[in-house]
Amino acid sequence: KSRKNCTKHHGSGGKQKIKIKNTQMLFGLLNPIAWNHLCVSYLIEPLPEAQRHAVFRAESLHLPRGSCVHHHGDEDHQDRLNDFIHGMMSLQSRREKRELSRNMKYVELLLVADSAEWHQRSLDRTRQKLLEAANLVDKYYKALNIRVALIGLEVWTDQDKISVSDNPRSTLDAFLSWRRKMLKTLPNDNAQLITGRSFQGTTIGLAPLRTMCSDYQSGGVNTDHAPVSSVGVAATIAHEMGHNFGMSHDTAGCCQARAEDGGCIMAAATGAPFPKVFSGCNLRELEVFLSSGGGKCLFNVPNTNSLYGGRRCGNGYLEEGEECDCGDEEECASPCCNANNCTLKAGAECAHGVCCHNCKLKEPGDLCRAPSGPCDLPEYCDGKTESCPANFYLVDGSSCAEGKAYCYTGMCLTLELQCRSLWGRDARPAPDLCFQEVNRAGDMYGNCGKDQQGSYRSCSDRDAKCGKIQCSTSASKPIENNAVRIETTVTGDKKKILCLGTHVYNLQPDEEPQGDTLDPGLVLTGTRCGDDSICFNGGCRNASFLRAGECTSKCHGHGLCNNNHNCHCDSGWAPPWCSQSGSGGSVDSGPVIPRSESRVLPFVLIICPPLGGFVSLLFVFHP
């Protein structure tokens, strides 16, 4: 197969198969090769001479180890909460949580290379390297039932479109701002910048936490610290995306992979040999993120017309001219699809998707995705396609928790739930005075995040409830393994009040001053901080800027606005504007068919032969 049109995943294990023909340029990873009971990783690098490649062991690379710094800056305040929102998770059944993990999810990824990266090699080789890196990232995430689809690859040649510097924080802020402005032109779920520059210290990447699918914060910046191959930058991209998914750095006991085999992707520091696997801790953190309502954009199948690298039968994406695509012949497990030519087997109507059962399409109106929380919306099969509609949720700024909170990226965030996730079930927010006094300090124990230079910012009284969260609890220590209890006593109304915060200390002495380990104690963006106010962009802002009320006003009082800015109508009202009678739902959700209708039809089909005339009369008078 031509390298122009596909990027091949090479299998692993005892039945290693490598097929390379008509190769124009190839560089990447063959991993692992079983040889005398040893697992050996090899790198392939194209030589200047046409059609020739160098093959060498990955461990022969001698590269400096680099570390990742989590972003705690102005833009997001999305520091990870370990076991986030136990209360919200209790809304889900175990079956629903298993389905979230089991169902395939898709990240539509945009990769951008800056001019410094381009200057290191030709335009074609830069593109090829990033294509190889995206292929490896896809391979790593497939183990988590996540496909990473490269839908855009942009190389900045003569001039960068943002200011790229050795300051990772300012570079990240500039890149995420650029992504936000370009979303309509280059729609994506996540964007990653690859730069040929070095960041300050040992930092090789930076990304916000728990922000996958956010219009404002879904992305990261990565240094190409291993210019010889695509494997190093792929590991960094996978790591920074992991933070977007809510994954923290692995602590002792998390990673079962041997250091000589590369260890795990979410290690705080990395180097050759590069990691290729996620740990069990990462999987649990991902499940928590999804169960709490995160990752709403991951459930729609990517537009195959926008996939970068060309079409191919066997890539697992249903493309024009294909009836099905269950992957390569070696990995296809579908009884409905012929993997060798991507055609349906005799009698099959479909092969994949939650709206396909036993090779047949489900009936229209069949619930294919239940709401995952108070800010999520249901979706239904349409009877025509095998895939469930994209996952839709209430527009950011919608009211939830009986008016005590706001929806943000599909999650209903409250201080109460965040305190419980930090300390346990009896925890609750401390009085407002605690937030004001502690966060006014502007130090590591009380702050409103960091500025672009990495310095802690003092909170004004208005912004105080968007800084370090302060709780009251009987618990002796936080749930987070690496967090310690920080006590502050303040005096209000002649009474002493105990304020409990948390702090995470660096585990390794050579880590950056900003801290490689997570501080779970900052209030999450999207949390209510006062009447008609929401935490955003490092402060407490009027929630009207999200324009949720303006959007919902067009629904005639019989529905709410979804994140596609369409009305999701209450039962009894019809989309698109909820102004006429109907079954509810939206133009995005699939047809909603009331249970009574779906139950009447089988009754008629069974009873009709002996009672045809009588049943017909029933239908006239009792619709």
Image: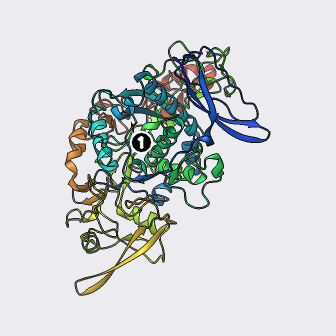
Q: Residue furthest front?
A: 49
Camera-nearest residue between 73 and 387:
73
Q: Amino acid at mark 1?
A: Thr
Provide the residue designation for mark 1. Answer: 223
Looking at the rendering, which quadrant does residue 500 occupy? bottom left
Total marks in image: 1
Measured as percent of width and height from the top left, residue 241 is found at: 46, 43
Identify the residue shown where x is 28% and y is 73%.
Answer: 438
Q: Residue furthest right?
A: 36
Measured as percent of width and height from the top left, residue 326 is found at: 62, 24
Identify the residue shown where x is 44% and y is 43%.
Answer: 295
Residue 365 visible within the image: no
Residue 463 visible within the image: yes
Q: Quadrant of the N terminus?
A: top right
Measured as percent of width and height from the top left, residue 254 is found at: 60, 57
Q: Residues within 10 Å of mark 1 (few under 14, many from 20)?
A: many
Q: Quadrant of the C terminus?
A: top left
Looking at the rendering, which quadrant does residue 604 occupy? top right
Camera-nearest residue between 528 and 578:
528
Give the side of residue 35 with respect to residue 395, left or right.
Answer: right
Identify the residue shown where x is 22% and y is 51%.
Answer: 543
Looking at the rendering, which quadrant does residue 551 occupy? top left
Camera-nearest residue between 98 and 225:
225
| 467 lies above or below 346 | below
Give the side of residue 248 with respect to residue 221, left or right.
Answer: right
Give the side of residue 496 with respect to residue 213, left or right.
Answer: left
Label 1 residue SS: strand
Measured as percent of width and height from the top left, residue 253 is found at: 62, 60
| 301 lies above or below 287 | above
| 503 lies above or below 41 | below
